[in-house]
Image: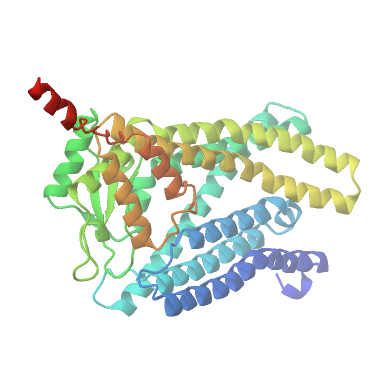
Amino acid sequence: MDPTQVPAEAQLSLVALAILNAIPVATFALWLDYFENRVEENRASRDYEHGPDLQLLNAAGITTALALAIVFFATRPYRVESPLGAVLCFVAAVIVQSVLQARAARRISPVGVGKDPETDRLSKEFSSSLWLASMITGYLTLTAIVALSAASIFHALGAEKGLVALAGGFGALGGILIGLTLVYALAPFTLRRVLPVEGMNPGRLRTMIESAFKKAGMTGPDIYIVKTQEVASHNIMIAGFPGGRGVFKPAVFVFEGMVKPRTPGQDTFTDAELNAMIFHEVSHARLNHLRKRLMRTCMLLPLSVLLGGALWALAATQLPAGTAELVQLILTVAVIAAPFASVNGMIRKQEIEADLNAVIEYGADAAAMISALERLDELNGRNPGVAHGAHPSTRERIAELRTLIAPTPIRMQPPAPDQDSDQGDKAA
């Protein structure tokens, strides 16, 4: 079809759709410029050798991806007029955002996983971008398939138009929950694709990890070393549901900086500190923390959607046209954000619970746990008084751990004998 024959309304729709997708990406790019400049200033002024925590960058990337998803779902008229153009605009925006984030992550905290830094950089950026775009596209595709299937079934049964639309909405919600479950379950596989990992060789640390899971009565997970030769990342984490098999089998990831000092003379973590952190991760698995997070999300998200949908419809009927659209946009964001905000609060409590369980249930050294947390903050360049991501602040965690450390008993010295009385007794 000759582009000149495309109706003016359709051309305007595509331009508007492209602009709507470009706004979050442009905002993200501007923020990245400020963020990277701030990082460089911190390094120059404070000798920030280990670089900043990347969680702020990841949070900004997730927020941008969420904004793009909201734009995609909230622009139904545009998608109806130009379905292919809408999908292409969305995918292009996701790819651009992914490349920007990968490059920023590389500048802030470069990961050395190959002999040729330039080749590795390009390969890593392309791989990360492709993987992120594939995940988001697959998630949206799954949601669309479930929604369309539900609507088609009700349509085939001769249901009214409103009921067909309602079925499609619940189908979309079901697709979101199914996709979320897969994201949680496939986390070990996903991390192996995103991070530069290799299987941990037999040795003291691997034996410690396997023994810890055996003590907890659990099947040992896959164990990987995250190769971080140039990045200051120090962490031990577990992913996946206990009992999973194949690509769903849980895995423990140990960042190389935990066992290999980056600078000569740098102190390594003691066995007691490593043991405490290992049992912290074992506690997450034994207490089913990941499954509880998923269950809360699956319960809260439908309730949030139902309440938000009712308010969304109320705004459409009771508010003026311009105000209604604004309120509906805010409600759309709130419907998605509220459940995850609740889950973040749950995660903070779970982190403290895992600390305490590691000490009480498995005999980890509370003092060693405290020193490990303090050293992690120092190595990762974090403020111990500030919560990072969904984790509570280190000071809050240490305060809870100190309640488990028995106070040192005060030994009372026996009173000195009364010399005068002693002499008097002798005289008598």
Residue 241 visible at all = no
Specify whether 54 is left or right of 148.
Answer: left
Q: Residue furthest front?
A: 427
In front here: 296 or 163? Answer: 296
Instruction: Name which quarter of the figure residue 282 lies in.
Output: top left
Check the image and report above or below for 177 versus 191.
Answer: above
Residue at the image point whose x is 42% and y is 49% from the top: 394
Specify whether 66 is left or right of 231.
Answer: right
Percent across and percent down for residue 9 are 82, 65
**Total count of labels:** 0
Percent across and percent down for residue 11 are 76, 68
Q: Quadrant of the C terminus?
A: top left
Check the image and report above or below for 1 versus 362.
Answer: below
Residue 181 visible at all = yes
Residue at the image point whose x is 59% and y is 67% from the top: 28
Check the image and report above or below for 414 versus 71.
Answer: above
Instruction: Name which quarter of the figure residue 234 lies in.
Output: bottom left
Q: Residue furthest top?
A: 428
